[in-house]
Image: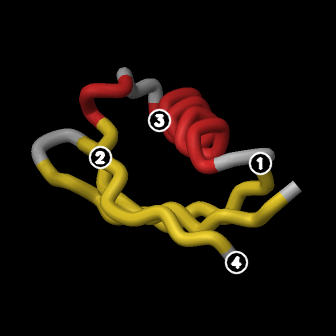
Amino acid sequence: MENYIISGTFKAGNLWERFTKNVSSLNEKNAREKVYSLIGSEHGLKRNMIRLDSITKE
C-alpha cells in the first residue's frame, strides 16, 4: 500500500474549511474515495460539499 497526502476544502456552514488527510491506499482513485468517505462521515457532508485540491504520493 502507498501513502497519499490529500488536501482540500469542505463546506462548514457558510465558510470553506481547509483540511489535509494522510491515507494509505492501493492507488490514487481509492485514496480519493477514502477521503470523501472520511470527511463526509465526520462532518455529515455530501461529496459536492467537499473539494479536493491536491493529491501527492509519499
Residue located beneath label 3 in the image: 43
Residue located beneath label 1 in the image: 25
Quarter of the image for the C terminus: give it.
bottom right
Q: Amino acid at mark 1?
A: Ser
Of label 4 and label 3, which has the lower sequence position? 3
Name the image quarter holding residue 3.
Answer: bottom right
Q: Nearer the viewer, residue 14 or 22?
A: 22
**How many marks can you see?**
4
Residue located beneath label 2 in the image: 51
Of label 1 and label 4, which has the lower sequence position? 1
The residue carrying pointer 4 sits among few (fewer than 14), some (14 to 19) or many (20 or more) residues within 10 Å by Cα, namely few
Of label 3 and label 2, which has the lower sequence position? 3
The residue carrying pointer 3 sits among few (fewer than 14), some (14 to 19) or many (20 or more) residues within 10 Å by Cα, namely few
Q: Nearer the viewer, residue 17 or 1?
A: 1
Of label 2 and label 1, which has the lower sequence position? 1
The residue carrying pointer 1 sits among few (fewer than 14), some (14 to 19) or many (20 or more) residues within 10 Å by Cα, namely some
Q: Nearer the viewer, mark 1 or mark 3?
A: 1
